[in-house]
Each structure stands twice: as structure tokens, then as C-alpha cells.
């Protein structure tokens, strides 16, 4: 693999991290959010620092041959630990029992990193190896132990996490199940990376040569595994994204009726775009509700009923027929208000009943009515 094989997935993961950075900053006190940030950051950093060009630059900058090896091992160890910790948060929440278990996992990760650092410091690895350090130093005292410690931790996490994910995926569904199954696939590749490296090292101990497993087979497995693993943790948030998209669609559908009613009532058609979407959606629905109440004297239940019956006769679905009939009644009411002077009369009972039925459809119902209104031509009052 060349540098681009590492830097491309690193860039993709970095974009994922940056896209979530505002939320991470806002909720930085939440342990789960910090864990997501650590996972994305370590995944991207792992690719960057494992790339041969970066390895050479880091070794020369520090002035220690193969300094990149323990650095990369430490980064990937933290990544693996973030994976299992985040999975624990997902499944069991942020209770005290989980927090104690999380502290034990991070303590174990810290011990692994300390062992890696000690072994590297005590060992002798004076010849720089950009791609095959694992096999080249497989029998070198202390460097050998460093490699064993790292691979053991990697394989242990690579077995524990997919086992937990697989069991959990059998009792959930939707986006969460998709994320868990993606995690299983990701850790299959990740564990394959560890096993390929371990097989090449063991072959060196036995006097054989399976270096290609370490240099040619393992890196692509690691790349696919890291990307799938990160995607698996992000997929369950698709439910939140789908809900946000539904809110945005509802907000947009309300636009035609909201703008028309605001203009009719002589009110400004302005939007605070910097406000949260939920707040804007609530404000828009409230404005429509209030403005429609002012149209009650001009609403005609018979107009809506007749339009509804015609739409059903034309083969329109019941939901669309209802939205179309309500939109038509509102369009006629707007035209009637514009063509007559305000009399100050009490709202007609039929108009109040008709509007009650319209407003009772809820947020999504009003949005569908507004969408149908936007598709209508301005009605004439000849009818």
C-alpha cells in the first residue's frame, strides 16, 4: 500500500470528525460524546501515522529509529478501547456500574501502552523499517514482546466486541441493528489484520517466511476494518438524521401556506435561519394556526366536503384527497377575505368546524395541506 491508501480513509474519517465537532463541543461533558470523538480522531490518526511516508517523517523529526512503531501501536490501542467502551455506553447507558467497567478498560489500555513504551525503550531497533517492522524484529528481545503485547490487545478486543455486537443485534432492529452488524463486519476485518500479523510473526519464530501476510494482506484488512467499524458506530445516528430530515421536509412543506397567510395578514415574512430547526418548525406551525383562525368566517365546510368527494371519485388516495380538499377550502377562504371587507362578525359555525378538522390533523397534516396549497392555482370566486 502506498501513502494514498492510508491518507484517503484518514481524510474521510477526519471529515466525519469535523462534521460532528460542533456537537462534540456542545456536549463535551457527555462521556459518550467524548468517546465518539476519541474513536473518530484515533481512527483518522491511526491511518495518518501508519502511512510509510508519515512513519519516515516522524522518525526523523524525533531522531529515534522506528519511533513511529510504538506511537502507532498506542493510537490503535486507544481506538480499540474506545470501540468497546462506546459499545458499553450504547448498551447500558452511563450508570455507575458502566463507568467502573469503562475505567477498568482504559486502565488496561494504559497498561498496554506503558508496556509498549517500556519494551521499545529497552529493546534495540536501530534499523528503520517502514513496512515490515513486525516481522523484521519478530525475534529481537523486547521488541518482540512489544509486538506481542500490541497484537494480543488488538485480537482480544477484536474478539470481544463483535461477539457482543452479534448477540445484541439479535434482539434489536432498525438503524441500531444495521450499525451492530456493520461493527461485526468491521471487527472481522480488524481481527483478520491482527491474525495475519501474528501468523507472520509466528512464522518467523519457526524459521519460515510469511512476511507477505504482514506487509501485503494485513494493511488492507486494517483499512476496511477501521472504516467499517467507524461507520458501524455512526449508523445508529441515522435514525436521528432521518428524524431531522423529516422535520426539515415538514418545515419546507409548510412554506407556501405560511408565506401566503403572513402576506394576507400584513405580517412580515421573515425567518430566523440561525434558530434551531425544531424552534423554527414550531413557530411556523403556530403562525399558520393563528392565521387560519382569522379565516374562520370565510371557510366553508361544504366546499371542503365537495372537493373531498370529487378527489376520491378521481382515484386520489384518502390522505391526499383530505389534504387537497382542505387546501382548496383555505384557498377559497383567502380569496373571499381579499375580495370582501372585514365585517367583524363572529366566525360561522361551519367555518369553525372545518378549521377544527384541519388543525386537528397535527403538524404533518398541516404540512401536507400546505404542500397541496402550493400546487393549487388561485381559485376564482365564480363557484
Image: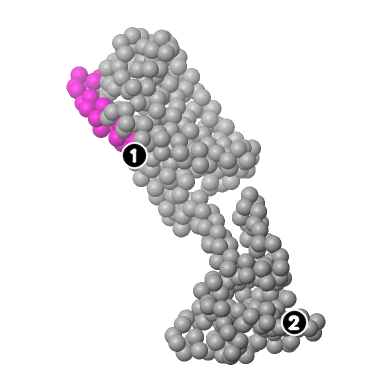
Examine the rendered structure and indicate whether residue 88 appears above or below residue 79: below
Q: Is residue 379 left or right of residue 222?
A: right
Quadrant (top left, top right, bottom left, bottom right) of the N terminus: top left
Q: Is residue 20 left or right of residue 49?
A: right
Q: Residue at x 56, y 74 (%)?
A: 373
Q: Position of residue 258 (x, y in %)?
A: 63, 67
Q: Nearer the viewer, residue 303 or 213?
A: 303
Q: Any mark on residue 177, and which?
A: none
Secondary structure mostly seen in the magenta stretch: helix
Which class describes the residues within 10 Å of circle 2: few (<14), some (14-19), or many (20+)? Answer: few
* Residue hosting label 2: 341
Magenta-colored span? 204-223
Q: Residue at x 25, y 32 (%)?
A: 217
Q: Nearer the viewer, residue 198 or 130?
A: 130
Q: Earlier in the sequence, mark 1 or mark 2?
A: 1
> Is residue 215 in the magenta section?
yes
Secondary structure under the numbered disc 2 in the rendered image: loop
Q: Position of residue 12 (x, y in %)?
A: 41, 38
* Residue hosting label 1: 224
Between circles 1 and 2, the one closer to the viewer is 2
Q: Residue at x 56, y 78 (%)?
A: 378
Q: Nearer the viewer, residue 324 or 183?
A: 324
Q: Quadrant of residue 308?
A: bottom right
Quadrant (top left, top right, bottom left, bottom right) of the C terminus: bottom right
Q: Quadrant of residue 298?
A: bottom right
Measure the C-alpha gap from mark 1 to mark 2: 70 Å
Q: Position of residue 89 (x, y in %)?
A: 55, 43
Which class describes the residues within 10 Å of circle 1: few (<14), some (14-19), or many (20+)? Answer: some
Q: Nearer the viewer, residue 2 or 192?
A: 2
Examine the rendered structure and indicate whether residue 107 appears above or below residue 121: below
Could you tell me if residue 356 is visible in this image? no
Amino acid at each position: 500500500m502506498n501513502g494514498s491508501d492510508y491518507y484517503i480513509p484518514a481524510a474521510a474519517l477526519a471529515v466525519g470528525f469535523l462534521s460532528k465537532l460542533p456537537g462534540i463541543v456542545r456536549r463535551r461533558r457527555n462521556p459518550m460524546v467524548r468517546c465518539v470523538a476519541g474513536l473518530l480522531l484515533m481512527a483518522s490518526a491511526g491511518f495518518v501515522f501508519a502511512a510509510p511516508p508519515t512513519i519516515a517523517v516522524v522518525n526523523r523529526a524525533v531522531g529515534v529509529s522506528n519511533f513511529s512503531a510504538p506511537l502507532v501501536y498506542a493510537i490503535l490501542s486507544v481506538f480499540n478501547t474506545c470501540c468497546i467502551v462506546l459499545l458499553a455506553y450504547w448498551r447500558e447507558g452511563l450508570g455507575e456500574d458502566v463507568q467502573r467497567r469503562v475505567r477498568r478498560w482504559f486502565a488496561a489500555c494504559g497498561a498496554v501502552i506503558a508496556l509498549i513504551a517500556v519494551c521499545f525503550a529497552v529493546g534495540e531497533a536501530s534499523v528503520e523499517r517502514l513496512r515490515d517492522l513486525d516481522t523484521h524484529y519478530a525475534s529481537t528481545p523486547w521488541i518482540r514482546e512489544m509486538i506481542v503485547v500490541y497484537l494480543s490487545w488488538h485480537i482480544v478486543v477484536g474478539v470481544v466486541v463483535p461477539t457482543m455486537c452479534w448477540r445484541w443485534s439479535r434482539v434489536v432492529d432498525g438503524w441500531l441493528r444495521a450499525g451492530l452488524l456493520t461493527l461485526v463486519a468491521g471487527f472481522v476485518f480488524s481481527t483478520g489484520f491482527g491474525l495475519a500479523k501474528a501468523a507472520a510473526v509466528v512464522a518467523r519464530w519457526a524459521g519460515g517466511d510469511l512476511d507477505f501476510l504482514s506487509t501485503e494482506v494485513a494493511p488492507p484488512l486494517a483499512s476496511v476494518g477501521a472504516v467499517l467499524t467507524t461507520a458501524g458506530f455512526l449508523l445508529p445516528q441515522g435514525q436521528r438524521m432521518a428524524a431531522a430530515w423529516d422535520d426539515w421536509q415538514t418545515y419546507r412543506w409548510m412554506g407556501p401556506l405560511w408565506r401566503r397567510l403572513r402576506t394576507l395578514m400584513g405580517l412580515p415574512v421573515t425567518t430566523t435561519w440561525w434558530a434551531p430547526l425544531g424552534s423554527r418548525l414550531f413557530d411556523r406551525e403556530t403562525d399558520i394556526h393563528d392565521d387560519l383562525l382569522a379565516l374562520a368566517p370565510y371557510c366553508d365546510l361544504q366546499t371542503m366536503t365537495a372537493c373531498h368527494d370529487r378527489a376520491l371519485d378521481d382515484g386520489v388516495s384518502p390522505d391526499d384527497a383530505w389534504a387537497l380538499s382542505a387546501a382548496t377550502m383555505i384557498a377559497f377562504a383567502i380569496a373571499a377575505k381579499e375580495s370582501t371587507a372585514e365585517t367583524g362578525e363572529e366566525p360561522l359555525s361551519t367555518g369553525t368546524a372545518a378549521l377544527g378538522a384541519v388543525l386537528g390533523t397535527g403538524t404533518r397534516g398541516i404540512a401536507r395541506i400546505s404542500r397541496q396549497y402550493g400546487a393549487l392555482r388561485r381559485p376564482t370566486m365564480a363557484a
